[in-house]
Image (cartoon, helix red, strand yellow):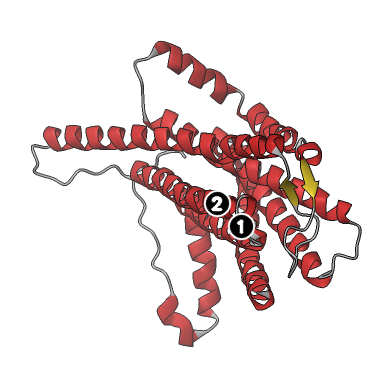
């Protein structure tokens, strides 16, 4: 069991490197775009907030895992561990809702609805994107604060115990845990699935219209709009896969008292890495710049020439 913990710690460290690299790249590219345009689009604001949350979550998460490995007998005071776990859960809440908010933004951009009331709600939300991305972390922290009251800082296994684990010990604690999982995982998942269906129906209808307008003589083309659709649907697919795994792992921890919280952090690292890669692919300027830098690095090593990535084509520009 100890070797499994060490293996998870090492694997999470490798994933942490990729998560930090891709999200810092997104952050720097966003700052560079802002200096060029002197403004951020709503999608860039959400992506920037998501990348900051990803990096903060990964750093705190890996620091906790490292401390847990170094202090294997939990001799250090438990409060720092508990505070770090509280921040980790809060940042996870932020990541889930930022991703859901981004998918919601793209669905409103791609799909028009005849429902006037729904359109007004969408417009009201999108006019206050900056306020929303600032409120999400505060709501996440507020949602997690009751853990300090209804949970107990304890080590739920005798062997290879983790330090400062927050676990429910009574009925109120279990009810709160269920509510937290619904708020942090299930609700954003429901919103993303709804957006996924909206985008899919829009895509199907649009393709039918384009095919009918060309009488089937030419293959329908959506240009860079298809790239945005692919990115949004990929975000949903990755989120749903992570949601299923995360709920299962949390069930094992709370019900069967399995000592696998490190596995939760490892899966979250995979999720944040893949999400960052999808976001980079979806933003044409980010993807082209990354491919360019990658190819320039390979130019220094002729033996690696076969690894060079072809430059992406340039379809009609659609702002993302």
Vertical placement of 239 versus 15: above or below?
Answer: above
Mark 1, residues whose alpha carbon is within 10 Å: few (<14), some, or many (≥20)?
A: some
Mark 2 burial class by Cα count in 10 Å: few <14, some 14-19, many 20+: some
The residue at which mark 2 appears reads as: 246
- Asked whether, in this view, residue 231 is left or right of residue 20, the answer is left
- Residue shown at 34% from the left, 16% from the top: 114
Q: Secondary structure at mark 1?
A: helix
Residue 269, relative to residue 1: is it above or below?
above
The reply to whether callout 1 and callout 2 are in contact (CB within 8 Å) is yes
Asked if residue 64 lies left or right of residue 252, the reply is right
State the residue lying farthest toward the front: 170
Q: Residue at x 64, y 50 (%)?
A: 254
Residue 185: x %, y % from top left: 55, 41
Q: Is residue 258 left or right of residue 208?
A: right
Which residue is situated farthest in the bottom direction here?
303
Which disc, if any, is residue 264? 1
Residue 162: x and y in percent read 75, 62
Ranked by sequence position, the earlier of labels 1 and 2 is 2
Q: Is residue 306 above or below residue 81?
A: below
**Mark 1 and mark 2: Cα distance apart in space:** 7 Å
Query: The N terminus lies in which quarter of the figure?
Result: bottom right
Residue visible at 72% across and 48% down? 167
Q: Residue 201: horizontal and vertical position, in percent?
A: 28, 33
């Amino acid at each position: 069991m100890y070797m499994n913990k060490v293996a998870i710690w090492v694997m999470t460290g490798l994933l942490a490197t990729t998560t930090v690299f891709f999200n810092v790249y997104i952050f720097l590219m966003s700052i560079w775009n802002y200096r060029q345009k002197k403004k951020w689009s709503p999608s860039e604001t959400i992506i920037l907030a998501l990348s900051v949350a990803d990096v903060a979550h990964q750093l705190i998460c890996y620091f906790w895992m490292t401390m847990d490995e170094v202090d294997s007998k939990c001799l250090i005071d438990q409060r720092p561990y508990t505070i770090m776990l509280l921040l980790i859960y809060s940042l996870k809440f932020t990541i889930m809702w930022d991703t859901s908010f981004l998918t919601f933004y793209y669905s409103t951009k791609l799909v028009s609805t005849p429902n006037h009331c729904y359109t007004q709600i969408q417009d009201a939300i999108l006019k206050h994107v900056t306020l929303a991305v600032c409120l999400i972390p505060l709501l996440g922290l507020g949602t997690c604060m009751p853990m300090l009251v209804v949970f107990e800082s304890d080590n739920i296994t005798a062997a290879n115990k983790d330090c400062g684990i927050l676990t429910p010990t009574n009925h109120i604690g279990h009810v709160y845990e269920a509510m937290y999982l619904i708020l942090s995982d299930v609700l954003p998942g429901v919103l993303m699935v709804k957006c996924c269906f909206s985008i899919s129906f829009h895509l199907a209808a649009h393709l039918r219209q384009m095919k009918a307008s060309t009488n089937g003589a030419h293959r329908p083309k959506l240009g860079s709009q298809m790239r945005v659709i692919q990115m949004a649907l990929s975000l949903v697919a990755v989120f749903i896969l992570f949601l299923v795994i995360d709920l299962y792992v949390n069930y094992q921890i709370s019900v069967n008292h399995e000592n696998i919280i490190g596995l939760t952090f490892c899966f979250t690292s995979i999720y944040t890495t893949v999400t960052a890669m999808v976001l980079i692919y979806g933003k044409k300027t980010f993807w082209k710049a990354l491919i360019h830098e990658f190819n320039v690095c390979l130019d220094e090593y002729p033996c690696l020439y076969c690894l060079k990535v072809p430059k992406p084509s340039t379809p009609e520009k659609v702002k993302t």
